[in-house]
Image (cartoon, rainbow, N blue to C red):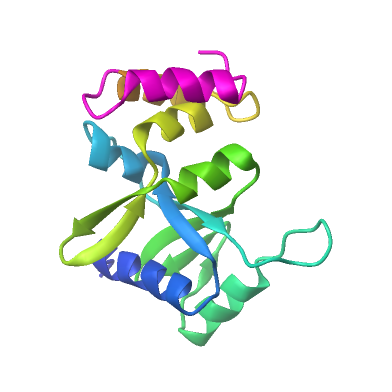
């Protein structure tokens, strides 16, 4: 049976063992911590990977970690404790900052890092990621009490993202 709590525990292990430098839960599961939950079947995790030579990003360390623990790979996911997890290497300074400024929560006794709502909105509205579904999620997060409107405005201006 899939265990979200056990999957989150495994994320902490990835960071402690150096397979990744840091992480933050993003996507629909992150919204659960800030606004009304929305249906999703997977867990999106932004990751900072250790320095790698060359311009090509390799997930070899993550795959080796998963294989050693018997976590199967399924399309773009690793099934961690039965939960489909999509590991998304940080792709730019905005994503780096989203990870670095993530809020830490306690989820059923497990520490979990979650992208702040202002950064989720900015990531959803990046030109390369902007879809109707993401625009709707960004609009819902904009209205969430946890969203700091001044921080959001400054972030959007700094990264030149149009609302």
Q: Nearer the viewer, residue 133 or 14?
A: 14
- Residue at the far top: name it: 163
Q: Quadrant of the N terminus?
A: bottom left
Q: Is residue 43 visible?
A: no
For the image, the number of numbered tags is 0
Examine the rendered structure and indicate whether residue 116 appears above or below residue 127.
below
Q: Nearer the viewer, residue 34 or 155?
A: 155
Q: Nearer the viewer, residue 114 or 155?
A: 155
Residue 111 screen position, x and y as percent: 26, 63
- Residue at the far bottom: name it: 68
Residue 58 screen position, x and y as percent: 71, 65
Examine the rendered structure and indicate whether residue 82 appears above or below residue 141.
below
Q: Looking at the image, which residue is at 46% across and 76% down? A: 71
Find the magenta span and give its range.
Answer: 143-163
Residue 11 screen position, x and y as percent: 40, 67
- Residue 135 painted magenta: no
- Residue at the far left: name it: 108
- The answer to whether residue 4 is left or right of residue 74 is left
- Residue 146 painted magenta: yes
Examine the rendered structure and indicate whether residue 161 appears above or below residue 76.
above
Q: Looking at the image, which residue is at 40% across and 29% down? A: 118
């Amino acid at each position: 049976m899939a265990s979200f709590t056990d999957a989150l525990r495994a994320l902490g292990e990835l960071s402690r063992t150096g397979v990744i430098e840091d992480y933050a839960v993003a996507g629909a599961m992150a919204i659960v911590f800030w606004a009304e939950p929305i249906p999703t079947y997977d867990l999106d995790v932004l990751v900072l990977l250790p320095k790698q030579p060359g311009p090509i990003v390799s997930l070899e360390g993550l795959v080796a970690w998963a294989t050693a623990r018997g976590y199967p790979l399924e399309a773009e996911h690793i099934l961690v404790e039965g939960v489909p997890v999509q590991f998304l290497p940080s792709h730019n300074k905005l994503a780096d900052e989203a990870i670095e400024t993530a809020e830490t929560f306690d989820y059923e006794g497990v520490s979990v890092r979650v992208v702040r709502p202002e950064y989720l909105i900015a990531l959803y509205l990046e030109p390369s990621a902007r879809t109707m579904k993401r625009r709707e999620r960004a609009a819902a997060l904009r209205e969430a009490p946890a969203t700091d409107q001044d921080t959001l405005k400054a972030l959007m201006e700094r990264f030149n993202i149009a609302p």
